[in-house]
Amino acid sequence: MNSVEATPVHPAWRPDGPNLVVQADNLEYLSRLPDNSFAMIYVDPPFNTGRAQRRQQTSMVRSAPGAGDRVGFKGHSYSTVKGMLASYDDAFEDYWEFLAPRLAEAWRLLATDGTLYVHLDYREVHYAKVMLDALFGRECFLNEIIWAYDYGARAKSRWPAKHDNILVYVKDPSGYYFNSAEVDREPYMAPGLVTPEKVALGKLPTDVWWHTIVSPTGKEKTGYPTQKPEGLVRRAVAASSRPGDWVLDFFAGSGTLGAVAGKLERRFVCVDSNEQAIDVMTRRLGPWLAPPTG
C-alpha cells in the first residue's frame, strides 16, 4: 500500500518506498536522490512572464523581510491578503541560473531509458532548447509538443497566443521507452477520409495536442495558479512510463502529475517549496497517500 507524509521534514525516497509529496527546495532535495531513479520526469517551471500568477480568493504580496506569513523563492517574505487564492513571483533576474542546475539534476535522475518533459511557453522555450541540447546532447531531443487551446482574452494588435511548448528529451536516443499504444486516441479531423474502423478507433496524437485548459467550473479545478489538465499530462505518463515505474515532478504545484500517476498505477514523487502547493496536493492526492506517521 502506498503511504506518504506531506511534511517540511524531507521524507527519504527509496525504490521500494511509498509515493511522496515533499516540501523542499527542489535543487537541494534532488541532490539527495540516487542516479537513474525515474522513468519519466515532467516539470512545469515558472514561465518567467515578469508578472505574478494568481487566482481569485486570496493573494500573496511582498512584505518587509520577516514581516510576512509566507516565505518564497530566495527567502522573500509574503503576506496573505483576502481576495485571491494563490500567487507567486514569476519573474527571476537570474532565471537560467535558477533553472539550469535543476535540469542538470533531471538528466542525472532519469533512468537510462527515461524521458524528460519540460513545459514552457514562447517566452523561454527557445533558450531552454539550446540549454537542453547542451545538457542532454542534440541527438537526445525527441520532440517539441505544441499544446494548443482556445480560451481567454483575444489580443487585437497581434495573433493571440494560444499554445504552450513542451520539450521532450531522452537520456539514450537508441534505448528510450515509448509506448504509443497506451496513449489516449483522438477523433480524426476529416473522418470521411478514413474507414469507419479507423473512425471508431481514433488516431494517435501528433506533436500538436489540442486540449482544453482546466475548466474554471470543472471537478479538476483546485484553484492553484497555472494548474495543467490531467488529460495533457496523462499522454506523457502513458507513453513514457510503465505501471509501477517511478515518475517525478519537482515543480509540482497542484500535483497533476501525481494524480495522473496514481490513476495509471505509477509511483510518484512530487516536490514543491510552496506551502499552499503542499496543502493542495495533500488533499488532491489523498487516494494514493496514507496519513502521516508518528
Image: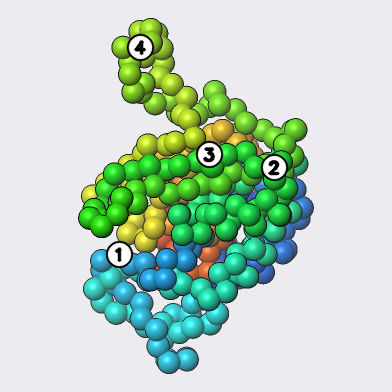
**Real-space Cα separation, disc 3 to disc 1, in angstroms:** 26 Å
Q: Quadrant of residue 102?
A: bottom right
Q: Are marks 4 and 3 in contact (CB under 8 Å)?
A: no
Q: Which numbered mark, 2 or 1, is in the foreground of this view?
A: 2
**Real-space Cα separation, disc 1 to disc 4, in angstroms:** 43 Å
Q: Earlier in the sequence, mark 4 or mark 3?
A: 4
Q: Amino acid at mark 1?
A: Arg
* Helix, strand or loop for disc 2: helix
Q: Which numbered mark, 1 or 4, is in the foreground of this view?
A: 4
Name the residue tied to disc 4: 193
Name the residue tied to disc 1: 55
Q: Are marks 3 and 1 in contact (CB under 8 Å)?
A: no
- Dot 1 alpha-carbon crowd within 10 angstroms: few under 14, some 14 to 19, many 20 or more: some
**Real-space Cα separation, disc 4 to disc 2, in angstroms:** 35 Å
Please, is residue 28 above or below residue 173 in the view?
below
Name the residue tied to disc 2: 140
- Dot 4 alpha-carbon crowd within 10 angstroms: few under 14, some 14 to 19, many 20 or more: few
Coordinates of residue 95 in the picture (x, y in percent): 56, 69
Q: Amino acid at mark 2?
A: Cys
* Helix, strand or loop for disc 4: helix
Coordinates of residue 215 in the picture (x, y in percent): 28, 47
Name the residue tied to disc 3: 236
What number is the disc on residue 197? none
Q: Are marks 1 and 4 in contact (CB under 8 Å)?
A: no
Q: Amino acid at mark 4?
A: Leu
Q: Residue at x 47, y 66 (%)?
A: 48
